[in-house]
Each structure stands twice: as C-alpha cells, then as structure tokens.
Image: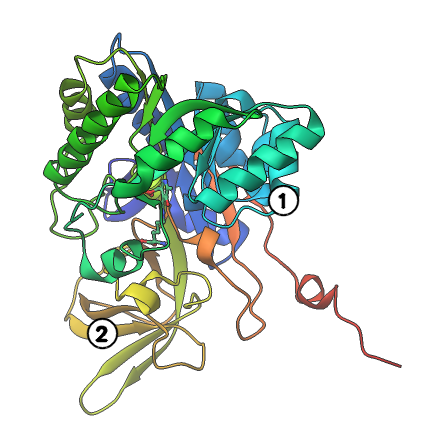
Amino acid sequence: FSSFNYRNHQLFAEEIPLTAIAAEFGTPCYVYSSAAIRTAYQSFDRAFGQRNHLICYAVKANSNLAVLNLLARLGSGFDIVSGGELQRVLKAGGDLQKTVFSGVGKTFEEIRIALAANIFCFNVESEMELIALNEIAGQMGKIAPVSLRVNPDVDANTHPYISTGMKENKFGIPAAEAERIYAIAQQLPYIRVSGLDCHIGSQLTEIAPFIEAAHKMLDLLARLQATGISIEHLDLGGGLGVRYDLEIPPTIEEYVKALCAATENYPQQLLIEPGRSMVGNAGLLLTRVHYLKHAPHRNFAIVDAAMNDMLRPALYQAYHSILPIAKRTGETKIYQIVGPVCETGDFLGHDRNLTLESNDLLAVMSAGAYGMSMSSNYNTRPRAVEVMVDGSSVHLIRARETIEDLYALEKIPT
Ligand code: LLP
C-alpha cells in the first residue's frame, strides 16, 4: 500500500493524516491516492516500451469522474460495459476513440450511442449481437469496428469466489465457433473486423493462464489471417490480481513484459483492460468504530461502514486488510468487524487482531477497485463520500449522499 504509510503510528494518505480527512469529511469515506493511480498507469505504459499498445482502463472497477479524468489526462483509453459508463468517460474528458465496449447485453440504444461516438471497437460477445450491430450501423450509415470476444477456455486459476462468477458460459464466443462467426462478420456490410479479444477472469495471481490464453488467441489469429481476415489489434482483457493478503501476484511490469514476449512475433497493436490492478491498492475505506460488543465467545467492533459501502467481503468472502488509523498499545483482542446492516453477511473482516476503543478510526485497505462502484443504498444508507489525495492536498470528488437524494425519485400515489 505504498501511498498509505504510518508515520509516528499514524496512517497517512500520501502527505495527509487520515485523521484529518475523517475530521473534515466524516466517515465512512473512500480515500484514493492519485499518486498510486498515476504510478500504476505509468508502470503499465512504460512496460510496453516501444510496443504499439493501448491501455483501456476497465471503468467498472472505479468509475468516479475524477479517477477517469486522472487516467484520461495520463493518456489512458477505457473499457466500458454500458451506456452509462460511456457517458462517464465523455463527461470526464476521456477519449472515446480509445474506448472499447465490452459486455454480453449491449442494448440497441447503447449500441447507437457508441456508434455515434465513434468508439475504437465493439467487443462483440455473440452472433446475435453481431447481426444487430450490423443492422444498427447500417441504419446510421456507420461502419462498426469489431473484435469478437472469444472464450479461450483457459482455467484462470483465480480465487474460487471470483472465478465461479467469471467462468459462466455467458461470456464470449466459444473458441470452436470463432472462425465461423468471423467469416460472417467479414461478409457483413456495416461491420469492419478490427481485432480479436479475450478476458479470462479477474484477480489472477499467476502469469501462466494469461500466456496460455495469448497463445490460443495467436493460433486463432493465424488461422483467421490465413483465410484473409485481417486482425489489427489483439485485446487480452484485464485480470491482473493485486495483493490483498498474502498472495503475491506478478508485478505490472512482469505481466506486461510477459504479454509482449508471448506476442513478439506479431505486429498487431496490443490492448489490455486492467481495472483492479490500476486502482485496487490506490484506495481505502475509512470507517469509525461505533460500538464495541463483547459477547461470551466473540468480540464485535461495529463500525459505520457496511456491506452497502463495500460488498466484496459479503459477496465473495473477500479478505481486506483492516488497519488502525492511530496505532494503540495495549491488549489486543480478536474482533469481528461488522457494519450496522441487518444481515449476518454484513461484515468487513473476521477475526482481526486489534486494540480498539470506541470512536477509533479504521482503514479497510485495497478498496479502490469494486468498492464504491459496487455500493448500494441498502437499509437506506447514503453512499459514502469520496476524496482524492494529491500530495498534501485533498479534493472532495463525490459528496456524501443525503437521505433526500435516496428517495428523490419516489412518489406516493395520490
Ligand atoms: N475486461 C472485462 C471484459 C471484464 O469483464 C473485466 C472485469 C475487466 C476487463 C477488468 O478486470 P480486472 O482487471 O479488474 O480484473 N466485482 C469483482 C470483479 C469482477 C470483474 C468483472 N470483470 C470483484 O470485486 O472482485
């Protein structure tokens, strides 16, 4: 967590003590380090060296406009999965000509908006989507640039709680069908075959599955080229893991270098769609201990953040390190760190060894990716405030929701 460090037993975000952030903005509060995001982007970019490449940040990981704007200014492209994400990229000053559109269920309206915006490429996930895209492009007098997202049938070997969701058959086109559907795409008048795409899963902690997928894609690419279908770019998706606990994922540099090496005999532009590895360890969720409750067999620390703010522990039993903002001396106890939501699944961490008093501040670490973006208003809890630290300044990047915000769209029938 290189941008979050202790100084004199106080946790800092870059140059700012987190106690000061809690005092100014309240809790729960998502805190992001712009230096950490910048460093991650630049590590990706530099590792490609001279290789023709495009980094398309996966917006779903953290779609705050300030995060998107920071990445846009660094030159990043974007991977979007909805019209909403497209609009965010636009609003944040992102370049839609560096944007790819993934997802199995693009609506016709979303396709129209993306065609009008001249995005870089549609990552098409089914034959039916391809036909629809051709038809809509024809109506609009446009030619749609297309990659087929092929399912390379590689065991991503990732954390079981995440891989179960990622291995659903709904993603991509089976490898055995790819050539047939590329041949159709080649014939469609309003489709331009532009690339080849895959994405094998998330939170991968080894390089081997990425390389296996790349090799399968290159075999397919060669077969396609042999039938006269030209592929200009190869999109290898996202998925590089981050360190939450004891896992030791490859570094960004090792990962990119391995992708470049595996594809070195190919002139195609390389695309990647990193989400978690760009922002995961650039954020934490700041929360305050409200009550301590000592039951006979368990100690509970009831904090003011909950599963609606950070769903990953409840949904995947994901581990996030939980650190005290001000380290205390004294006897430690084993705590269950839980939120106020009325669900047994509402926990942020189990069995954490901490010295706590009520009112203490805690940081749920590695919360920059799939934290705020998966939040909800369950139990009519306003979403947390978000701030971004840049050196010794801190910027409010999303105000805390009010209760009025939560029912603003509701109506009581008269
Ligand atoms: N590209 C595609 C087509 C994707 O489906 C995803 C993530 C990415 C790129 C970015 O993957 P990343 O680099 O972030 O691994 N909510 C889960 C993660 C779901 C990932 C879904 N797809 C979690 O909190 O662990």
Residue carrying label 1:
108
Most foreground residue, 131 or 289? 131
Who's the residue at 19% across and 67% down the image? 352
Q: Is residue 140 above or below residue 338?
A: above
**Quarter holding the N terminus?**
top left
- Distance, label 1 to label 2, CA atoms, is 49 Å
Residue 214 locus on image (x, y percent):
20, 30
- Does mark 2's beta carbon lie closer than 8 Å to ligand 1? no
Residue 218 locus on image (x, y percent):
21, 25
Residue carrying label 2:
335
Quadrant position of residue 310: bottom left
**Quarter holding the C terminus?**
bottom right
Q: Is residue 257 visible?
A: yes
78 on left or right of 326: right
Q: Is residue 12 visible?
A: no
Callout 2 crowding tier (Cα within 10 Å): few <14, some 14–19, many ≥20:
many
Who's the residue at 60% across and 49% down the image? 399
Labels in figure, total: 2
Quadrant position of residue 111: top right
Quadrant position of residue 296: bottom left
135 on left or right of 274: right
Circle nearer the N terminus (1, 2)? 1
Q: Is residue 233 above or below residue 109?
A: above
Who's the residue at 54% across and 44% down the image? 82
Q: Which amino acid type is marked by label 1?
A: Phe
Q: Is residue 377 above or below residue 94?
A: below
Secondary structure category for the residue under label 1: helix
Residue 236 locus on image (x, y percent):
29, 31
Q: Which amino acid type is marked by label 2?
A: Tyr
Most foreground residue, 322 or 67? 67
Residue reaching furthest to the right: 414
Callout 1 crowding tier (Cα within 10 Å): few <14, some 14–19, many ≥20:
few
